[in-house]
Amino acid sequence: MDHEDEFLNTFFILVAQLCSDKAKESVEKERESCKQMQMGPWGMLLMHLPQIAVAERSYADLGFLHTKNKGFLRKDNSLKTVYESLKSDLKRLEEVTRGTNSIGATVANVSNQLCQFIMARIQLIDFYEKMYNMSVNGKVMKYQELLQYIEGIVEWHLLSCSHLALAAIKTGLTLECEILVQLTRAQVEVQNWRFLPTLMALYGAQTRMSAWERTLQSKESWKLGFGATFLKANQQPALYQWLVKLRSAILAKCSLYFHTTLSQQASPGEMRSIMSKQNGDYYHKMQTFQRKHDVSAILIIFDSRGIEDSGSGYRHPARGADSFESFPVVVCCPNTFTQKRSVHLDNIQSKIKERQLELVAMDKVIHYKSTKDQCTYAFHNTDPRMTLVVVLENGKQRDKETHITSFLTDLSMHIRCNKVYECLKLSK
């Protein structure tokens, strides 16, 4: 391996490990050792490398959603602008060094592939901004749209950054993209009540997160910038910790939607112990509210119309899809409420059909009072096909409507994971 390739390999390993200070020190030593080449292709490349190290550290600190970042000496120092400026500089460097000599050819090749890497970073920043903007003010998260977006980034950069010296940062980029694909796919699958695909996506995310964590074995002490207190005590970068938080939130959602199936695999005591360790024990919240406010039942109904291969458990791929009712019960507190068909389920199904457009907007709680059956129902969608329902006897609803509305709104917001996506933008 040539000296230049060896240096670049070591430098980008440090960048991938987010050791920006060590990476910058290595550049300074290299510039000192080859002063006679300062104005040549190699010297020009060395001038740009420290900015890459600083930018990558800032990116891992979730700095890409801020307009002011420490370490960049320019008026408009948003991280996206910094990356775009770097890309322009490296593009010019590639043009002036190509075809000069062997070192110039190496510099031109590395500059070209760094432009590809930086382009991927800019596209990922756009993706994170897209997720954040979808989440604010309780907006509906369009997971299928997000999945197509991140899969497009993966496909676009599949063959980029092939230079051996860039292997470390390419590995980190690939793992980050694949984690985002798996977590977004898990969101798509869980809201469509698909058990095995959801579990496989969550497992796929976890294996890649473990692999990414191993690439960060050599770490500088983390000092989160931007006045952030987010996960201050943790050694791992804020971006990695946010991905852990997102996976935990999806796992908690999965544990609720597939609670009936999972509870058949463990004793009640074991189930309580497992659920208590989740990011949020939504089933326990439903139980607590149902008992505290003496409501008849709290349940989630799935609208399976126009969708195939959904359900609460495994299904062998060679077996045809089961034909089950259009509005199966996903989970219910208490369990006895749905053990036999009742007029309540018919009323609920009828109202979901009737108020579908309002429910899928997911912006308000809908109340329906049945004088005939002496019951009041409150509906709020947690996902486009998932409706959270509270059933209350008419004689017991005094002063409870406000509590029910607040409960449905709060629980739905947490199940949707909007708050986790809002955490991308740290308080300054």
Image (cartoon, helix red, strand yellow):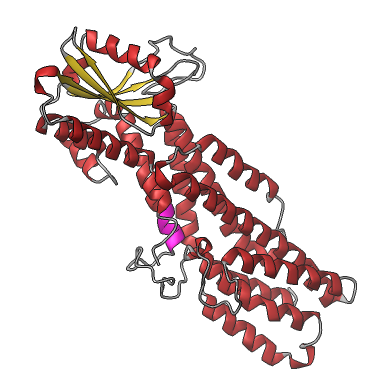
Residue 229: where, in percent of width, then height?
A: 34, 67
Residue at 37 percent of width and 51 percent of height: 245
Look at the picture and state if 114 lies above or below 316. below
Q: Is 298 on the left or on the right of 227, as rendered? A: left
Classify residue 350 by image quadrant. top left
Q: Is residue 8 visible?
A: yes
Residue 117: where, in percent of width, then height?
A: 67, 60
Observer-nearest of 327 and 404 = 404
Residue at 55 percent of width and 41 percent of height: 146
Q: Quadrant of the N terminus?
A: bottom right
Whether 245 is among the magenta residues is: no
| Number of numbered discs overlaid on the protein picture | 0
Residue at 14 percent of width and 18 percent of height: 393
Observer-nearest of 331 and 290 = 290
Whether 239 is among the magenta residues is: yes
Q: Is 299 on the left or on the right of 130, as rendered? A: left
Residue placed furthest toward the right: 99
Residue at 32 percent of width and 42 percent of height: 414
Label the magenta part by its dominant secondary structure: helix
Q: Which stretch did the figure color magenta? A: 238-243
Look at the picture and state if 395 lies above or below 207. above
Classify residue 355 by image quadrant. top left
Residue 386: where, in percent of width, then height?
A: 37, 26
Q: Quadrant of the C terminus?
A: bottom left
Residue 254: where, in percent of width, then height?
A: 35, 35
Look at the picture and state if 183 lies above or below 385. below
Look at the picture and state if 284 lies above or below 334. below
Observer-nearest of 210 and 390 = 390
Q: Is residue 271 visible?
A: no
Observer-nearest of 423 and 162 = 423
